Image (cartoon, rainbow, N blue to C red):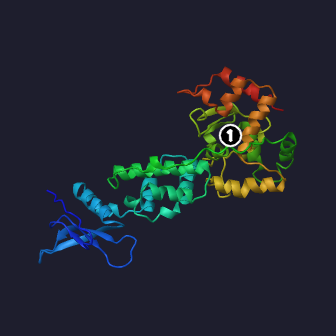
Amino acid sequence: MFFNIKILKGCDNMKRPNGNGSITKVKGARRKPYKVTITIGWENDSGKQIKKCIGYYATAKEAEKVLVDFNINPFNLDLASLTFQDIYERWSKTKYKNVSSSSIVGYSSAYNAVSKIHNMKFKDIKAIHLQEAMDESNKGYPTKRKIKYLYSQLFAYAMSNDIVFKDYSPFINIGKKEKESERIPFTEKEISKLWEYENKIDFIDTILIMIYTGFRIGELLELKNKDINLINKTITGGIKTEAGKNRLVPIHPKILPLIEKRYNESNELFMVNAKGKEMKYSNYYREKFLPIMENLNMKHRPHDCRHTFATLLSNANANSTAIKKMIGHESFITTEKIYTHKDIEELRKNIELIK
């Protein structure tokens, strides 16, 4: 049974019947002066109540609501003390076992961008805190979209564990989608220059492989050697979209030697760092791709390689259906991707139109 306690103006202590908790206004100039305390037990000898503070609040009304809500639906006080960072770490331990490394990079970037709320108790986080953290991150639309998705994932986790009872992520405004920056394909002269330096600059082969396969850098970084068939001269890969997953791309004769040279059965992944370990996108971009562009006086991003592949095929009058299949266009979503010998030969015929 709960008792309705009337809050009197000017009253510093608002007590409820034993066991229902109390609200105390702490003296001094505080932003949140109203302390909510609940009883968690009694001392064996004296029978005196053992109390615990569950939070401080700006107004008596807000404090009263928290205490009423607690009495109606008590929450685990240990869980209630968990911060945004704690929830993220608990959630990621399970989540990261089942997602790609590129997805992990995306989640991590989103998390790092909202450091303002890392140390806030998760149960105290409201829409205004989420919005401020995002706005102050100064990130673009793609990252803001990832941040909002991360919010929704963490709130879903917190709600499933009775840490909070409301999801504030749907109320977050990420603004309008920005106009995508222009993707500029490599020119014939630039491609020739890449070939010229292929044996002189480390990792320049990876740029050429992307140009002649259409694979994104994230897809190439996750490509496993078992998905490269050197006998049939095909690569099966792709991760980003349903249409792009496990798509088959014939190996163009020009890059076959590059793939054979980099292929190492002792490694699980096709692209590895100097220690034979998985290479992160940030490391590849910062330590490999950018220095190559600077050395050759070129201004491109990794995704320009994929755009170049599509442009080369189009300029060579390749079949539009084959182009869409090889780049993973959304119009080719199927539940099963089964490639017959005829399909493969048709794709090979089109990719070899690139000279």
Residue farthest bottom in this picture: 28
**Does any portion of residue 168 appear in the rendered image?**
yes
**Does any portion of residue 74 appear in the rendered image?**
no
State which quarter of the image contains the N terminus.
bottom left
Q: Nearer the viewer, residue 58 or 68?
A: 58
Q: Nearer the viewer, residue 22 or 151?
A: 22
Q: Position of residue 16 (x, y in %)?
A: 18, 66
Q: Residue at 50% across / 47% down in the picture?
A: 149
Image quadrant where residue 51 sits = bottom left
Q: Relative to 182, is 59 on the left or the right?
A: left
Q: Position of residue 103 (x, y in %)?
A: 55, 48
Q: Position of residue 60 (x, y in %)?
A: 30, 66
Identify the secondary structure beneath mark 1.
loop
Residue 295 against residue 218 in the figure, above or below = below
Q: Residue at 61% across / 27% down in the picture?
A: 331
- Quickly name the residue at label 1: 215
Q: Residues within 10 Å of mark 1 (few under 14, many from 20)?
A: many
**Amino acid tagged 1:** Phe
